[in-house]
Amino acid sequence: GQNIDQPTEMTATEGAIVQINCTYQTSGFNGLFWYQQHAGEAPTFLSYNVLDGLEEKGRFSSFLSRSKGYSYLLLKELQMKDSASYLCAVMDSNYQLIWGAGTKLIIKP
Amino acid sequence: DVKVTQSSRYLVKRTGEKVFLECVQDMDHENMFWYRQDPGLGLRLIYFSYDVKMKEKGDIPEGYSVSREKKERFSLILESASTNQTSMYLCASSLFEIGGAVGANVLTFGAGSRLTVL
């Protein structure tokens, strides 16, 4: 079966760095997406990786290792507004998205 | 900005009622999707559509149907609501290109419709 694993909840301090991991087992691979979802709101796109390596976008970076079935989202200089759920999704060989359950990130002052 | 609008943010229905959830997008996207989101579970795809009048079953289509009569509108129908259909329903749209640019496969979501079935 296809599976995406990510931690259920993480806590970090304002101004710090946090890494949210995502491991996957899917039928084929056509890219990995990260979305951010604030409570009660729609998920919004953060990043996309299809090749191995690090993609940096401001305070957020996303890393992919296809051989390990592994990705992480790195958030630097954490702000209170980063408190949200972070969803990892993989596009499989049929171009269907497989979603993780999401990681709830709590930022403390 | 791409906008996906869901007609109702909160609905309360009784078991056995027929429920319509409407979704409209304004960016001429080919693809539209209905997901449900439940605590502790990933987004689960109910139905999707690649074109007008086209529909494909997702992972959990049982108890649901859809309608896409116009490109911009995708409706989710619960013919006879049951308590296990209490959930957050998310509509999304996208372009789609195999091997295309990243933006082509990014989903834009609506704000969600929280349905409670009593």
Image (cartoon, coloured by chain):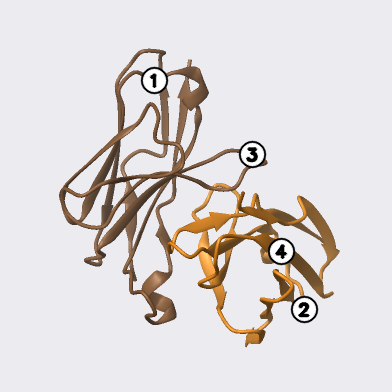
Q: Are marks 4 and 2 in contact (CB under 8 Å)?
A: no
* Chain B: drawing colour: brown
Give the foreground label among 2 and 1.
Answer: 1
Q: Residue at x 70, y 69 (%)?
A: A69
How many marks the image carries: the answer is 4
| Residues tagged by mark 1 and mark 3 found on one chain of the structure | yes
The residue labelled by disc 1 is B81
Instruction: Give the distance between the C-alpha atoms of the residues marked 2 and 1, in whole angstroms.
Output: 45 Å
The residue labelled by disc 2 is A77
Q: Residue at x 44, y 18 (%)?
A: B82
Q: Mark 3 belongs to which amino acid? A: Pro
- Horizontal side of B38 relative to B64 (left or right) equals right
Q: Quadrant of residue B51?
A: bottom left
Q: Are marks 4 and 1 in contact (CB under 8 Å)?
A: no
| Residues tagged by mark 3 and mark 4 found on one chain of the structure | no
Image coordinates of residue B79 in percent, x first then y, are 30, 22
> Pointer 2: residues within 10 angstroms few (<14), some, or many (20+)?
few
Q: Mark 2 belongs to which amino acid? A: Glu
The residue labelled by disc 4 is A22
Q: Chain of mark 3?
A: B
Q: Chain of mark 1?
A: B
The residue labelled by disc 3 is B39
| Residues tagged by mark 4 and mark 1 found on one chain of the structure | no
Image coordinates of residue B33 in percent, x first then y, are 36, 51
